[in-house]
Image (cartoon, grey):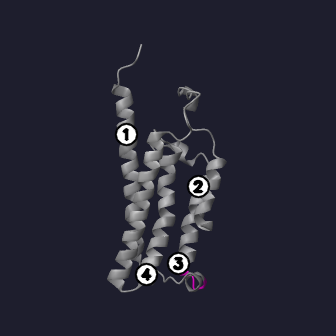
Amino acid sequence: MLVVASIGIMFGLDMASPGIMNRKPWKINEPIINTRMFALLFITGLFWAAMVLYLFQIGKNTQGSSQIGQAMALVSLSLMSIFVAPNLRFPKDTAFQHAIFSNSRLVYSHIWVVLGSILLMETRLFPSIFGTTSPSAYQWWLCLIPCVILLVVGEIYKASLRYRERNSPVAV
C-alpha cells in the first residue's frame, strides 16, 4: 500500500483540470460522487478484483506456485493504479493530452509505483518478507494487459460521453 498510496496523496495536491471554469457549476443538492460515478468506481473495482484473482490463478496454475500468483497479483494491482489515475483525473476528457504531465508530483508518484513494484519483486529482501518470488519478463507483460484494458475502456467510455454531449439536443 505504501507504493500505491502516493498516487492518492498526489491527487489532493493536483492542479485544476483544464477547462474547469467552462463547465457548468454543480447543483447545490448534487452529491460529489453521483450515481454514474459510483457505478463507474464499482465496475472499475470489480474489474481490478477480477484481474488480480485471474492473474493469481494464472501464476498459480501455470507455474504450480502460489508465490508466482501472489507476485503477479501484487504487480498488477500496483500498476493498474497508474493506468486508472488518468481516467479519474480527467473524467470526461481524454487522458492523452499534455495536461497529464501538469502535476509533477503525480508523475513522480507514478515513477515511484513502478520503481517500488520492481524493488518489491526483484530484490532479495522484499520477496522473503512478503512470501513472493520474482516474476519472469513474460509474467510482467501479463500484468500489464489489464492495465492497458483499463485505460482503453476508460477512453472509449469517455469518448462516448463526449459524443452524447455533442449530439444531445440543447435545452432552450
Residue bearing the label numbered 4: 68
Q: Foreground residue, 34 or 90? A: 34
Instruction: Identify residue type, mark 2.
Output: Val
Residue drawn at (45%, 67%), measured in percent from left and top?
A: 76
| Mark with earlier residue (1, 3) | 3
| Mark with earlier residue (3, 2) | 2
- Circles 2 and 1: CB distance less than 8 Å? no
Residue bearing the label numbered 1: 159
Which one is closest to the eye, mark 4 or mark 2? 4
Secondary element at tag 2: helix
Residue 22: image quadrant is top right
| Mark with earlier residue (2, 1) | 2
Q: Which residues are magenta?
A: 121-125
In this picture, is 73 found above or below 147? below
**Residue count near mark 4 (Cα–Cα under 10 Å), binned few <14, some 14–19, many ≥20:** many
Instruction: Identify residue type, mark 4.
Output: Ile
Quick one: quadrant of the N terminus?
Answer: bottom right
Res. 144 in view? no
Q: CA distance from mark 3 to mark 4?
A: 10 Å
| Mark with earlier residue (3, 4) | 4
Instruction: Identify residue type, mark 3.
Output: Met
- Circles 1 and 3: CB distance less than 8 Å? no
| Mark with earlier residue (4, 2) | 4
Which one is closest to the eye, mark 3 or mark 4? 4
Q: Foreground residue, 154 or 111? A: 154
Residue bearing the label numbered 2: 107
x then y, percent, for residue 41: 47, 50
